[in-house]
Amino acid sequence: MMRNFFRWFYTALLMGVLPLAQAVNLPEINAAAYVVADEQSGMILASRDKDARIEPAALTKLMTAYLVFDALHSGKLKAQQPLKISTAGWHTDGSRMFLQQGVAVNVETVVQGMLVVSANDAAITLAEAVSGGEKAFVRRMNAEAQKMGLENTHFVNCTGLPAEGQYSSVGDLLLLAQALVRDFPQYQGWFAKKSFSYNGITQLNRNLLLFRDDQVDGLAVGYTINGGYNLAVSSKRNERKVIAVLVGADSSEARAAEGSKLLSWALTSFNTARVYPASHKVADIAVYKGAYGKVAVGFLRDAYVTLPSNGTQQLSIELEAVQPVVAPVRKGQGMGTLKLLLGKQVVAQQEVVALDDVGEAGWFSRWLDAVSLWWRSLFS
């Protein structure tokens, strides 16, 4: 089995180019678009139209939450810091926690109102606290989306209310959800709260799966007339976590049923294991003009693989190294691509990086290597 792990592990950090649903029978998922991935390996296990533009609706608040968590982590916001509610926050349409204009409420309470009942008045209040106003905050949302590589996403507001020019995709929303889980695990418990009370009003979380499956611990739901019922959900079983995004369900009940079906399939049909620890050498690559003649390459983080629990296919790997590599080399520098092949077809690929620094050699060694490179270039 370990030999099969080694053949498969290079898919571990991929954002899903291997159609694993073909290897494991996937039930029919009644939704316009969906994607489900293993949290540790990052592998996409199944998807439909993951890059198609959709209305993100309240799933927009995943990015709002990311920036708010970042502000809490950096100390720009404090959990018990009082926030005064503005006219803009008070008058926001849609879901509300019923904040009152001019009344101070602490950050933690407002954040929980946004996460548990998708309160738009809470989202506006937090955007103002972080950036001074919603427009400035939205600019930060789009800048962060670019940093995350969300190529099919553009935000116009922080609430998810329908707006011209606001769009995303289930693939991008998956990346965003993964970033939330990875970067801010200390706040994940807030997503799992089943109810929220403020000012004498108690509201239930609209994510029905929280009431039906103890393994579900978030993340958000949404709805628009044109886009239908949406869901971003995470579930953990036996130390293994999966994240799914589903849009275009016909009702809140259908959203929960189809989301449950997708999560259950992903958790029962696959196993995930660590195959290489962080900084484990995968190969050596020659270095010219360096203090050392080679550099070890691999991954800076632990490498995990997700495999169908009913067996594996016979895959092969190929290292396509950057050539020539000339010193200096810095740790973390891209050094090539590991490709996973099924026959001659590339089904996945992932960048490998240098695991160490390599400084420049002395002038004589550099001169010798320069001659070697010149000679090599004559025959390339």
Image: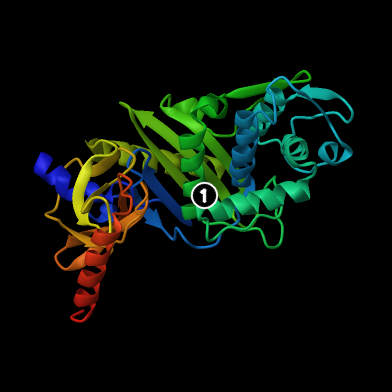
Drawn side of residue 48 relative to residue 255, left or right: left
Report x, y in % for residue 183. Answer: 49, 35
Q: Is residue 322 above or below residue 140?
A: below
Report x, y in % for residue 219. Answer: 53, 36
- The residue at 20%/54% (across/down) is 293
Mark 1: which secondary structure?
helix
| Amino acid type, callout 1 | Leu
Q: Foreground: 159 or 149?
A: 149
Colour mode of the rendering: rainbow
Quadrant containing the N terminus is: top left
Instruction: Report if residue 161 is visible in the image.
Output: no
Drawn side of residue 212 relative to residue 108, left or right: left
- The residue at 27%/36% (across/down) is 268
Drawn side of residue 280 relative to residue 234, left or right: left
Report x, y in % for residue 160. Answer: 67, 48
Q: Is residue 199 above or below residue 235?
A: above
Q: Label 1 belongs to which residue?
A: 173
Report x, y in % for residue 337. Answer: 28, 59
